[in-house]
């Protein structure tokens, strides 16, 4: 009955189409809103100067040399985008089995952070904590001789990685490795080193997804990972109660913000997270999701602007505070005109 009262009296007294009759009334009665402030832009950085290299499986996405990255981030800040997430493309000869470059204070990603930070832009800088850009095998953690990913040994290295990134000026540390217990250990390491104001956005519910393919191309880890699976640490796509347990643990360990990944296929997880925990919650529209939309649009099979904005508002409707998306710059430019 309460349901009925909410819906209003029956037709013809109630006509829901009345509120949809013109653009202004649709705008006035909207329930959700997408703004550039909701967006986090993932960007790729590589060595060199004055370079922008296309990522073939992600049309429109490039790897920037850090000087070009600075210009791109400045544009993002001007458009009102809240943060950028910087991912390094490491030369293959710098990768090794333990990902040793990850903890070097002068590595590619730390130098990029410093260079962007020096511009004093009004935009947050976020960085993954995980070993995959730095390992020769493409896994997020250390392997033993049987090919198993070592949890506790990896967490120790992740803490060091978080510290060099915080020291370079990273505002938000994002553990994306899915090791158990890493959020608490990283929080303690940061606090012990006077980085108590550095935020943690945990990839809490990160699924072992086939939709990360183009990202692994961008990072150059597709070949190295070969047929290797991340299923012993990333979550099984069949599960959602387990995601609630992952999130509860990360909150207890000190996560400030929670991320769900991939995005559109996991809106049920975003919805449950927001309902259950009421914590700042973010969805990652991953590379495969981006590339599907881009590829179809480039063939004129779908309309890019329409599909892009509709896909992003879906995250907001599910309860996300914000979205990591490769569309961030394009979407923000478009939102400015709308
Ligand atoms: C690294 C990482 C991945 C992504 C973000 N951080 C890939 C992976 O876990 O293999 C995927 C992002 C995307 O597909 O856009 N751990």
Image (spheres, rainbow, N blue to C red):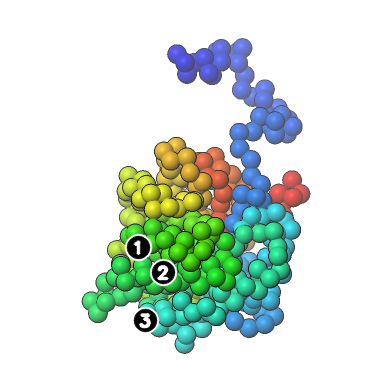
Q: Residues within 10 Å of mark 2 (few under 14, many from 20)?
A: many
Q: Nearer the viewer, residue 8 or 156?
A: 156
Where does residue 202 sit, x and y in percent of width and height? 45, 56
Give the residue pinned by disc 3: 97
Give the residue pinned by disc 1: 179
Q: Is residue 314 above or below residue 224?
A: above
Where does residue 35 sit, x and y in percent of width and height? 66, 47
* Tags 3 and 2 touching, CB below 8 Å: no
Q: Residues within 10 Å of mark 3 (few under 14, many from 20)?
A: some
Give the residue pinned by disc 2: 158
Q: Quarter of the image containing the N terminus? A: top left
* Tags 2 and 1 touching, CB below 8 Å: yes
Q: Earlier in the sequence, mark 1 or mark 3?
A: 3
* Tags 1 and 3 touching, CB below 8 Å: no
Q: CA distance from mark 1 to mark 3?
A: 17 Å
One can see residue 122 in this view = yes
Identify which residue is drawn at 57% across, 61% down. 171
Q: Is residue 1 above or below residue 163?
A: above
Query: Is 73 situated left or right of 145 in this image?
Result: right
- For this orientation, the residue located farthest to the right is 337
Query: Is 21 situated left or right of 32 in this image?
Result: right
As drawn, the label of residue 246 is none
Q: Earlier in the sequence, mark 3 or mark 2?
A: 3
Judging from the image, what secondary structure is the residue with disc 3 in?
loop
Q: Select label 2 or label 1 by which is in front.
A: 2
Q: CA distance from mark 3 to mark 2?
A: 15 Å
Where does residue 220 sit, x and y in percent of width and height? 48, 76
């Amino acid at each position: 009955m309460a349901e009925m009262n909410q819906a209003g009296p029956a037709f013809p007294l109630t006509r829901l189409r009345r509120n949809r009759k013109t653009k202004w009334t649709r705008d006035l009665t909207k329930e959700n809103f997408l703004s550039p402030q909701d967006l986090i832009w993932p960007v790729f950085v590589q060595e060199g100067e004055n370079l922008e290299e296309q990522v073939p499986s992600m049309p429109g996405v490039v790897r920037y040399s850090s000087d070009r990255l600075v210009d791109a981030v400045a544009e993002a800040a001007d458009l009102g985008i809240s943060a950028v997430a910087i991912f390094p493309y490491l030369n293959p000869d710098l990768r090794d089995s333990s990902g040793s470059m990850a903890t070097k204070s002068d590595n590619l990603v730390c130098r990029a952070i410093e260079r962007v930070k020096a511009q004093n832009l009004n935009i947050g800088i976020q960085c993954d904590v995980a070993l995959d850009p730095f390992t020769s095998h493409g896994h997020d953690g250390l392997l033993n001789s049987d090919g198993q990913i070592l949890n506790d040994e990896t967490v120790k290295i992740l803490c060091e990685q978080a510290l060099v990134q915080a020291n370079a000026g990273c505002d938000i540390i994002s553990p994306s490795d899915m090791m158990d217990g890493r959020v608490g250990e990283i929080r303690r390491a940061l606090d012990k080193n006077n980085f108590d104001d550095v935020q943690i956005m945990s990839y809490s519910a990160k699924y072992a997804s086939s939709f990360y393919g183009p990202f692994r191309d961008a990072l150059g880890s597709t070949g190295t990972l070969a047929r290797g699976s991340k299923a012993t640490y990333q979550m099984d796509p069949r599960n959602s109660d387990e995601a609630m347990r992952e999130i509860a643990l990360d909150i207890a360990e000190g996560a400030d913000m929670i991320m769900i990944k991939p995005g559109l296929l996991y809106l049920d997880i975003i919805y449950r997270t927001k309902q259950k925990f009421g914590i700042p919650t973010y969805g990652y529209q991953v590379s495969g999701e981006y590339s599907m939309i881009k590829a179809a649009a480039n063939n004129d099979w779908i309309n890019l602007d329409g599909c892009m904005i509709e896909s992003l508002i879906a995250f907001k409707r599910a309860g996300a505070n914000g979205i990591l998306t490769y569309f961030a710059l394009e979407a923000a430019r478009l939102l400015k005109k709308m």
